[in-house]
Image (cartoon, helix red, strand yellow):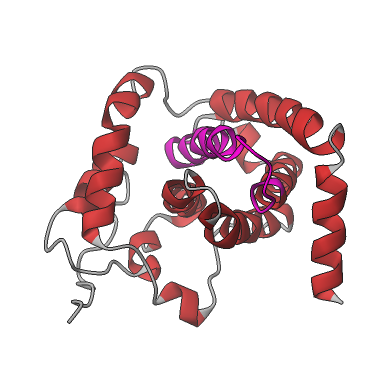
Amino acid sequence: MTARADYGRKSPPEAGARELLDHFAEGDPEEVIRLDDVLAGLEERAFGMLLFLSIPTAFIPGIAGVISGPLVILVGVQLLFGRNEPWLPNFLGRLGPHRRAMTTFRNRLRPWLSRLERVVKPRAQVLLDHPVASAFTGLNLILLGLLLSLPIPFTNVLFAMLLLLFALALLERDGRLLAASWATSVLAIAVFGVLSGSLATAVAEWLHLLN
């Protein structure tokens, strides 16, 4: 039987990305960590953590469009409309990864995070907090989520790396990194979405589902 998450182990409020991954990787490998518990106490930084949790499946072709794409879109929509903290449907808040998966994810990212944490730090936070900037971040994430949902060959790894930049920028409160993420995202959306016509296809499919 799968263990239920320990509700007393909430996210350390000021921890960085690597510390958070360490925190949630500790414990019974078969224990499920509920998303509600992962995000508790992070406030505006919770959007970054939610993006972080969408990254592992984004590296897997096929699964990326089913799990990561919709989750990224959910984050993007909420940023677009100016929410300060993420909202999750009850059924989604009760779900989450096993600690075993968090351990694997942490071990794979550790060398990259060690390098990035030397240059990533809280700065230029107006780019994170201004409503227009937040909406622009949300729009980028919506478009990336739509593209991630499409079976475009050899792009899921690129989009996963872009999501990692956005996640770190939001989690570490680094406005400069966020600006770099915008620039890279706009380029990727233009090349793989607009020029290939894939983005129009994705938008049409989502509008059809909404109707």
Q: Residue at x 71, y 39 (%)?
A: 133
- Rendered-image quadrant of the N terminus: bottom left
| Residue 182 is one of the magenta-drawn residues | no
Q: Residue at x 20, y 68 (%)?
A: 31
202 sits left or right of 155 in the view:
right
Image coords of residue 95 (percent x, y): 39, 73
Question: Measured along the vertical axis of the image, is residue 184 above or below residue 16?
Answer: above
Q: Can residue 124 be seen at all in this image of the molecule?
A: no
Start-end of magenta stretch: 147-173
48 sits left or right of 74 in the view:
left
Question: Measured along the vertical axis of the image, is residue 2 above or below residue 206?
Answer: below
Image coords of residue 205 (percent x, y): 82, 62
Pick the residue in front: 43 or 211.
211
- Rendered-image quadrant of the C terminus: bottom right
167 sits left or right of 144 in the view:
left
- Number of numbered discs on residues: 0
Q: Residue at x 29, y 35 (%)?
A: 108
| Residue 164 is one of the magenta-drawn residues | yes
